[in-house]
Image (cartoon, helix red, strand yellow):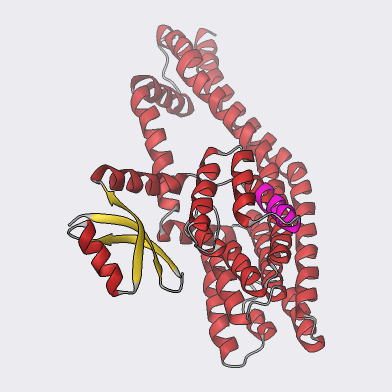
Amino acid sequence: MPKYLYTAKSADGTPRSGEMTANSERDLAVQLRADGFLITSMKLVKDNDRAKKTTMEFLDRFSSIPLKEKLFFTRNLAVMISSGLSIGKALSNLSMQTSNKKFREILLVVYADVQKGLSFSDALAKHPVAFDDLFVNMIRVGEVGGSLEESLAILTVQIEKENDLKSKVRGAMVYPAVVIFAMTAVAVLMLTYILPQLTGVFVDMDVELPKMTQIIVAMSDILIENSLLVIIGTIVGGLGLKIFLGTRLGGRTLSWIALHVPAIKNIAVKVNAARFARIYSSLLKSGVSVIGALDIVADTLSNDYYKEAIHTSKDKIQKGVEMSSVIAEYPNLFPVILAQMVKVGEETGQTEQMLMKIAEFYEAEVSQITKNMSSIIEPILMIVIGTGVGFFAIAMLQPMYSVLENIQ
């Protein structure tokens, strides 16, 4: 049965849009009329359109909108709305200014939906790859309460802090990533070009190679004889890992690693504590209920263990348990100071302010940790590089010493 994309309006002007199956355009109009809606536009969904949509949904797993683009959009949208521009006009202007092609296409679709009568928050909700639950709900609260400008200001600060946090953590990882990549490239060069020349000398010497040398020679043979398979295997392995991490099991595995590897755990806990405190505080400040705020926070945090803890906390809070008491039950996820400061906020009626102070405190902690990481990682990398070079040197020199001993 054919499928149609449609937009329609009820007698009181309520908009409706979506996808529906019907034998013909006439049948589609009859079905919608029975629900009290009149069609304003319709389009037959062709098989190649569906295939294209499925392909785009699959590719969306491998891409996302940069935080800098969303920050630019949110900050400028707040300025334009405060200047008296309509949302439609502001969206039209911003879609032409963004440098990200994918984000520009999304903004144009949002603009078209708003022009058709869809609310701004509902139009954004159709694009989760660009606008998460936090963003959509903050906009919805602003629309309902007539404080859209204030909601956008809060979102601007939230995205700016999140961008700073991610930039610092990512920046701390750049140095070791570059060194590891360079080490790997040099190792491949040695095994595929330099080592074969040396092994030819060893064959002419007719000596029995030590175990270390045999291991390196075997690695060299594998790379040379199966170079195409190695390249394909590396690419497939990388894509497979990317897909796996996007699954439920992969996400949970990554979450477990983040909370159990000593070198990573400290950063992971403080980053999640900072995000939880800032997002929760921003939502409460915007007028979202405690339960609604916890639902949004749980969906916003990326670590599965934090999601589960917050959902469990929500159920307990509904039964009358204080937030600070619930947080204290998860000392491995939430630092003790977080529970203590939330407790003070509950007792003084300043929970939002306390949460914001906590967020600023842990953001400063993460900033300091990332600054110190380079000085910590550098000697570790030097040891690893030295060990690798030493292993290769010994493996190459041992056969030569054997030959010299036999000559003597």
Between 266 and 33, the residue placed more toward the observer is 33
The residue sitting at 35% across, 69% down in the picture is 37
The residue sitting at 37% across, 37% down in the picture is 236
Quick check: 23 left or right of 389? Answer: left
Residue 242 coordinates in the image, percent (x, y) = 44, 46
Using the rendered image of the protein, determine whether residue 302 is visible from the camera's viewpoint.
no
Residue 346 coordinates in the image, percent (x, y) = 76, 85
Residue situated furthest front in the rendering = 11
Q: Relative to residue 28, is residue 353 depicted above or below?
A: below
Residue 180 coordinates in the image, percent (x, y) = 60, 34
The residue sitting at 48% across, 14% down in the picture is 193
Which of the 4 image quadrants contains residue 11?
bottom left
Using the rendered image of the protein, determine whether residue 5 is visible from the camera's viewpoint.
yes
Q: Quadrant of the N terminus?
A: bottom left
Quick check: 149 left or right of 257? Answer: right
Q: Main secondary structure of the magenta part?
A: helix
Q: Quadrant of the C terminus?
A: top right
Q: Is residue 117 magenta?
A: no
Residue 157 coordinates in the image, percent (x, y) = 74, 58
Which of the 4 image quadrants contains residue 347?
bottom right
Quick check: 57 left or right of 117? Answer: left
Between 223 and 117, the residue placed more toward the observer is 117
Between 164 and 325, the residue placed more toward the observer is 164
Between 406 and 163, the residue placed more toward the observer is 163
The number of discs equals 0
Quick check: 168 left or right of 321? Answer: right
Magenta span of residues: 72-82
Residue situated furthest bottom in the rendering = 320
The residue sitting at 79% across, 63% down in the picture is 360
